[in-house]
Image: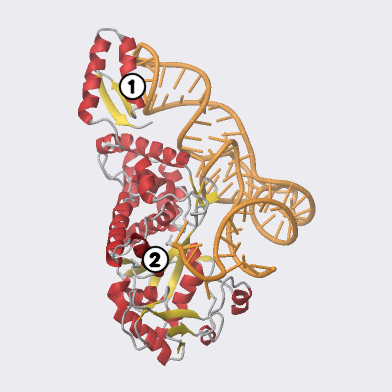
RNA sequence: GGCCCGAUGGCGGAGUGGCUACGCACCGGACUGCAAAUCCGUUUACCCCGGUUCGAUUCCGGGUCGGGCCUCCA
């Protein structure tokens, strides 16, 4: 059975057939680097990482591009707030992001382009849109002429009238049509800007992805992914810009992951349930976060709870115990079928429960789990935990107590360690091993 | 108002026109000085109302509830 993926464009699962069978090309919308990424941002990173790993298994070459948006008004505002140079803010935030996603077990994309490195391409694309009659200049802005594109709204399934009727934002007076959106806007002296035929300014929100995707993947490519909130307006506008500027089809398969809620509520700053990846990593191993995320289907809502994280950790504990030193066997058909069915990772995990160790190892390798020694997994230091020497000393003390039949003392030592998050396990032959856990 | 999702056991979460998925938790047993880990076993479900059908959790229609988008948003 071939890989089938749900395409937002058609709202159907379709057999995936890359334009070039020897080279799959995929673009995923990355972060705007003005603040710590939150666990909602982690979901597409993990989901598309799983997809890339799966594609790499089936195709000789996969190019995975995930951008860094380092030009954006929120960045400017934050830098002013912190009173630091914009470049310092974006670089620092990008580094934190890289560390976070690696801690989640995600491989680095092949290319991580930055907007600031693509200004000539952005300006050229806008100029092209003007030349082709799809954009116009007005009061220092350049706007995309939405009525000039006949298929506009196809991805999000809304027509222009709906959008205007539902508009929550005041329409700028210089727009020819209320649905028109900004490609380029003027910058004042205090705002980052680049020279252009329309004066010193900066790009609008959507054009950077069109330009960077074209620069690294060509005008038409296979997969474009992101959170479902990007369907409109971001991806709709990307399609408009790219199709009109390139006069060629843009993306074959559009993929969108569902939202993350926290204890059943949408994460938002106003609700105060905003959880950064960094904070989450202080409480749970990255691998547990990765597993908890993939235990739900990527298009379903995912509710972030501590219980889900603990459960994922318990699953990983079991796998690490079972698989220490086991070599990978053949990947089972049932697992392949689940993965091929629109990346049905929950079903894949169910299949994995039934497997012998070598087959299970093969599955975990593909998904990027259990890639370190069991000892490293079980004994990885948590925040503020006891160090290894102290733990070993306590174990020796308990061993002596046990030999003296002073079980009360032995149990007290074990309980004290447990309070510090260290669990002891007595093995046959008087050996005691320890692990960090609940 | 328009558009789009979803509703399965204590929790998470697949799937199927008839044959109790699975995991976690719980409970019982084995093992252990006692635990932990492991092994064995038990228990719990398909939102509501119609329709189609020999039979529906699964298909169709209606409803209820929940979530999302409608130019900040993964």
Q: Is residue A314 visible?
A: yes
Say which residue appears at 42% left-offset and 74% top-offset.
Answer: A206
From the image, tell me which residue sits under label 1. Answer: A416
Say which residue appears at 54% left-offset and 83% top-offset.
Answer: A173
Q: Chain of mark 2?
A: A
Say which residue appears at 31% left-offset and 83% top-offset.
Answer: A195
Is there a contact, CB below 8 Å, between mark 1 and mark 2? no
Q: Residues within 10 Å of mark 1 (few under 14, many from 20)?
A: few
Quarter residue A129 falls in: bottom left
Q: Is residue A26 left or right of residue B24?
A: left
Viewer-side residue, A205 vs A408: A205
Vertical arrangement, residue A355 with respect to residue A208, above or below = above
User: Closer to the camera: disc 1 or disc 2?
Assistant: 2
Q: Residues within 10 Å of mark 2 (few under 14, many from 20)?
A: some
Q: Secondary structure at mark 2?
A: helix
Mark 1 or 2, nearer chain start: 2
Quarter residue A165 falls in: bottom right
Viewer-side residue, A315 vs A178: A178
């Amino acid at each position: 059975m071939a890989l089938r993926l749900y395409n937002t464009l058609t709202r159907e699962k379709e057999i995936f057939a890359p334009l070039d069978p020897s080279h799959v090309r995929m673009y995923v919308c990355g972060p705007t680097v003005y603040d710590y990424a939150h666990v909602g941002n982690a979901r597409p990173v993990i989901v598309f990482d799983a997809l890339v790993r799966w594609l790499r298994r089936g195709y000789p070459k996969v190019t995975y591009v995930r951008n860094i948006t380092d030009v954006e008004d929120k960045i400017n505002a934050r830098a002013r707030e912190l009173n630091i140079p914009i470049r310092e803010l974006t670089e620092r935030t990008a580094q934190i992001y890289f560390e976070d996603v690696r801690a989640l077990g995600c491989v680095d994309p092949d290319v991580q382009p930055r907007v600031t490195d693509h200004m000539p391409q952005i300006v050229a694309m806008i100029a092209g849109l003007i030349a082709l009659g799809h954009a116009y200049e007005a009061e220092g802005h350049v706007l995309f002429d939405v009525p000039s594109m006949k298929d506009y709204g196809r991805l999000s399934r809304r027509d222009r009238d709906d959008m205007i009727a539902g508009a929550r934002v005041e329409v700028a007076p210089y727009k020819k049509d209320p649905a028109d959106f900004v490609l380029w806007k003027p910058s004042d002296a205090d705002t980052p800007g680049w020279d252009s035929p329309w004066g010193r300014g900066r790009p609008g929100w959507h054009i950077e992805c069109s330009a960077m995707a074209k620069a690294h993947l060509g005008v038409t490519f296979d997969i474009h992914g992101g959170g479902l909130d990007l369907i409109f307006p971001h991806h709709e506008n990307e399609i408009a810009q790219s199709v009109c500027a390139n006069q060629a089809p843009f993306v074959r398969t559009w993929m969108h992951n569902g939202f993350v809620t926290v204890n059943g509520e949408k994460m938002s700053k106003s609700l105060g349930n905003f959880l950064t990846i960094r904070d989450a990593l202080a409480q749970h191993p990255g691998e547990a976060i990765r597993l908890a995320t993939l235990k739900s289907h990527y298009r379903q809502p995912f509710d972030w709870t501590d219980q889900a994280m603990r459960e994922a950790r318990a699953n990983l504990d079991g796998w690490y115990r079972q698989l220490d030193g086991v070599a990978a066997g053949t990947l089972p058909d049932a697992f392949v079928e689940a993965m091929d069915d629109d990346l049905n990772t929950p079903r894949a995990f169910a299949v994995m429960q039934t497997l012998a160790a070598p087959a299970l190892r093969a599955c975990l390798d593909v998904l990027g789990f259990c890639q370190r020694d069991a000892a490293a997994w079980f004994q990885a230091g948590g925040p503020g935990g006891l160090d290894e020497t102290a733990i070993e000393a306590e174990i020796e003390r308990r061993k002596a107590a046990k030999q003296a039949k002073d079980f009360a003392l032995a149990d007290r030592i074990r309980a004290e360690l447990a309070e510090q998050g260290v669990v002891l396990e007595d093995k046959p032959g008087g050996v005691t091993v320890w692990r960090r856990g609940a």
